[in-house]
Amino acid sequence: MATRAVGAKRSAVVVERPGRPALVVYVFGRYIRAAHWIRNALLIWLVLSGIYIGNPFLARVLYPETAEGFVMAQIRGWHVAAGWILLAFTLARIYQFLFVNREGKLGIGAELRMAPIMFSWKAWRDQLAFYLLMRRDHPHFTYSNYGPLQFLVYTMLYASLLVISITGIILASPYVSGGLASFGADLLRPIEVWMGGLSNVRAVHRFVMWFFVLFTVAHIYMAVWNSIRTGGLIIEGIVSGFKADDVETTHVSKEELDKGKAQ
Amino acid sequence: MSRARTQADPEAIDRTLDEASIEHYERLAAEADQHLDKLAAQAPLKDTTLEYQLRKRGVTRREFLKMTAVMTATMALPSMFDLRVARAAELATRLPVIWQELQSCTGNSMALIRNSNPGVDELILDLISLEYAEVLMAPSGQAAEDVLEASIERYRGEYIAVFEGSVPMADDGNFLTIGPAGHTGIEVVKHVAENSAAIIAAGTCAAYGGIPAARPNPTAALGIADFLNTQRINKPVVNLPACPVSSTNVVGTILEYALFGRLPSLDAFGRPLWAYGDRIHDKCERRGHFDAGQFVEGWSDTEGLKAGLCLYKVGCKGPMAYNNCGVVRYNDGTSWPIMAGHGCIGCSEPGFWDTLTPFEVPLAGRRYPVFGIDADADTIGAVALGAAAVGIVAHAGATMVKSATEQRAAKKPEAKKEQ
Ligand code: SF4
């Protein structure tokens, strides 16, 4: 589980939990929390409007006269706009993943350095054992904020965000002449040809949407489950920024701990 | 630009064009003049002339010029090319063309010759020197074969090869044999293509394999360009997909060749940009209703059908298909599918029979074979979601049982101590 966020201001406080003392740490900075919820809202809108665009289910009697309201064009327009914003967040996050190091400076990304966790057999065994109820304690990985499963799924998530953005740009471009979408689509033309035309591009766009729906459901369940099972304040964490961890196993330094106690 | 100006000065350039475009078109015009002069210097291949053909049809010169002006606009050229296109039509008698049928339904030929009111397209088809075309020619059998051989011999490296239909590759190409000697499609295309100057793939089958190449593609059919790639034959190919291709696009491409001596600029799928640069959706007369969200709700929605609402919900694939049907239409510009009330089926797209079906529902209804069942993307997604829900409930239940046992186990030793 993530116990430190890159670039987040740190402070920690020990609280008594029934059974074992826990250390409440500030892990999710303002930007991370805001970005999480903004992306969440964008994804909900994108999925709903996307389903509408794929099959406009509202009856036409609900709409104003042709000349007075362009419902489909509006929904399409806001779908594309939300897509661009989501892409901006995605690119910022990928940049952070790849190039922001532990000190919050430019370098080899701190999270990129955690990638070996995906190839650690022991880490996989520990994490799966935890989720399959075969061990009680959440495994702690000293070199990684993420367990191997998380690392894999989040990597897939960002890959999917890129795929859905690429296909989205290709699909949006014929509706406009010039502009960013056309420019992007011209660059992406080889991908369009490789995929075999707009029809397949649209099909991929649709399937990746379903990946997000599935991801969201699984993600919410895992977070709630983890929060209950470990008492880790995980749901709380993405709202307030504070998360709880076991005192013995956490890798918060001595000074930080003392600072927290003093407060 | 005023009408009077156009007539007084046919070389006048549209003043709405900017400097760069004017320069560009002037360069193009010079190129066209040069090539037309070259064509004019050659001997005509046919003993017919434009004069004769016009008289035979009772078409006045004025009507002819109107038709070529429309053609010029269709080819996305400015009005300074009107007379040049007319001249190219006159000189088209000097352009040898070989029209080769392959694995096809001859629908493209039919679309070309079945114009009830022959216009410029048919006129030009009569004018060009169609050296060999099975559907149109009188000879058959060995005689036809001889004509083909003689034409290839005579115009080696100069003729335009028009192919109609796909090339079956399976069983050594024996799914298609042509002529008394039983040449396979593979042999015929190789022979005709190798000696041509340029190639036109007329219709979707010739361009991308079309319906014969639809899954599971029993004859292993290929489009012409793909076939030539496998044979390492390097010839310029222009794809004119559609089922059938509109005669305007065939004639426009031939005229462009007469005009400039080269094939038009192509898009990523080898189609001329002047014809396939925009989607059906972008040139559709029902587009306003699409943007307004007013759709024909089903085939029994007579109200919507009569009002001419958008056909998206009854399966129109116009948003995925590139072609100019909405502009040139079929049968002398009489009508086209969407005008007639059925959605576009996207017949000018590669693999349309697999990727754009079923035709009567939006693309979200496209079916994929999974575990032996045909299901659409949303069904697959919903089933996956259901499976996830079942998994979640099972996992949550297991966790509750496990915690309960853990708590009991934790309490037990304490209870023992108390005793
Ligand atoms: S009928 Fe088809 S091509 Fe025309 S606007 Fe509707 S979806 Fe687009």
Image (cartoon, coloured by chain):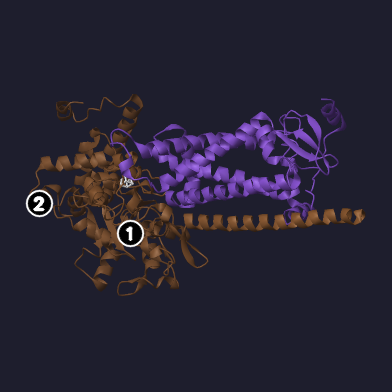
- Camera sees residue B135: yes
Q: Colour of chain B?
A: brown
**Left or right: where does residue B79 sit relative to residue B205?**
left
Q: Residues within 10 Å of mark 1 (few under 14, many from 20)?
A: many
Q: Residue at x 14, y 48 (%)?
A: B50
Give the position of the C terminus of chain A as an image quadrant: top right
**Towards the viewer: B265 or B398:** B398
Looking at the rendered structure, the secondary structure element under dot 2 is: helix
Q: Which chain is purple?
A: A
Residue A166 placed where, x, y %?
52, 42
Residue B186, by quadrant, is bottom left
Q: For mark 1, what is the residue? A: B163
Residue underneath mark 2 = B57
Q: Nearer the viewer, residue B130 or A102?
A: A102
Give the vertical position of B116 relative to B168 (above or below). Answer: above
Query: Is disc 2 in contact with disc 1, using a CB cutoff of under 8 Å?
Result: no
Please state if B166 lies on the left or on the right of B35 as rendered: right
